[in-house]
Amino acid sequence: MAFFLKVEEKLIIHIVGAGPKSNTITEITQKDENQILIGVDNGAHYLIEEGLIPEAIFGDFDSLSNENLEKIKGLVPNVFIYPPEKDETDLELAIQWAIKQKPEKIFIHCVTGKRLDHEFGSITLLIKFMNSGVPIKIVDEYNEIYVILQGTHFISKLQHFKYVSFFSLGANVVNLTLKGFKYPLTNHLLEIGSSLCVSNELLESEGSISFSEGIALVVRSKD
């Protein structure tokens, strides 16, 4: 069952996963009424440690003690407990619920680092939900990761993320054109597995990427 919340426009949802705790959690504030926090398994505990009460939590919660779980259940309005054996990951179920709330964008925290299978699985979920109509980004203190489809996209220069990398996912990226970057391209074929577009940099306040076919993974990062 989905619980639809009465929210205003420009709703932002933050999903906190159960991976290594990211410093990006400390940047979340509950003072913004147009913001929903979701905890996935131990991510619920991360939020409460920061004094942030999630609107919903998802998981089997096998990583939490019974005492902590009962405490969280007493604070959180929407609790979704699933068995460990299921077809979807807890994060996927949380994203499905988040999209139904019709947010402007979704940020996913604490899903990078440590186990590579979990990290790669989280990134592939960006592809699964790329046609949802909701921009979804994975963020940590060193990276911002998202997927874009064919067309023209503008990228603003950010002081805290010096590098911008592009990767082809699923199929070659056709007619890739980069403008405003240190290493520009015009109508280039970016093949799967190519490292050509790793660690590019913006020269101007804004650059653009355009392509006619394919799916591009964008990774903004810093050292």
Image (spheres, rainbow, N blue to C red):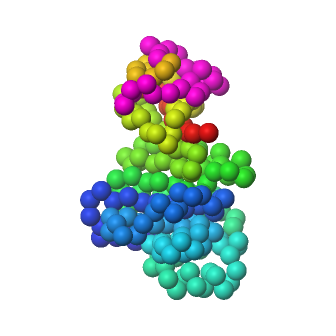
User: Between residues 90 and 222, which one lies in front from this camera angle?
Assistant: 222
Q: Quadrant of the C terminus?
A: top right
Depicted 203 relative to depicted 39: above or below:
above
Q: Is residue 147 visible?
A: yes
Identify the residue at horizontal 44%, vertical 39% (top origin). 158
Identify the residue at horizontal 33%, vertical 59% (top origin). 11
Identify the residue at horizontal 59%, vertical 61% (top origin). 17
In the displayed image of the protein, which residue is found farthest to the left?
Answer: 9
Residue 131 at x, y = what percent? 42, 43
Q: Is residue 88 visible?
A: no
Depicted 15 relative to depicted 69: above or below:
above
Q: Quadrant of the N terminus?
A: bottom left
> Magenta segment range?
184-207
Identify the residue at horizontal 47%, vertical 60% (top origin). 27
Q: Is residue 199 magenta-colored?
A: yes
165 sits left or right of 118 in the view: left
User: Between residues 185 and 66, which one lies in front from this camera angle?
Assistant: 185
User: Between residues 185 and 61, which one lies in front from this camera angle?
Assistant: 185
Residue 143 at x, y = what percent? 56, 44
How many marks the image carries: the answer is 0
Q: Is residue 182 magenta-colored?
A: no
In the displayed image of the protein, which residue is found farthest to the front?
Answer: 159
Residue 91 at x, y = what percent? 57, 59
User: Between residues 132 and 158, which one lies in front from this camera angle?
Assistant: 158
**Residue 84 picture quarter:** bottom right
Residue 2 at x, y = what percent? 42, 69
**Residue 179 picture quarter:** top left
Depicted 172 relative to depicted 74: above or below:
above
145 sits left or right of 42 in the view: left
41 sits left or right of 136 in the view: right
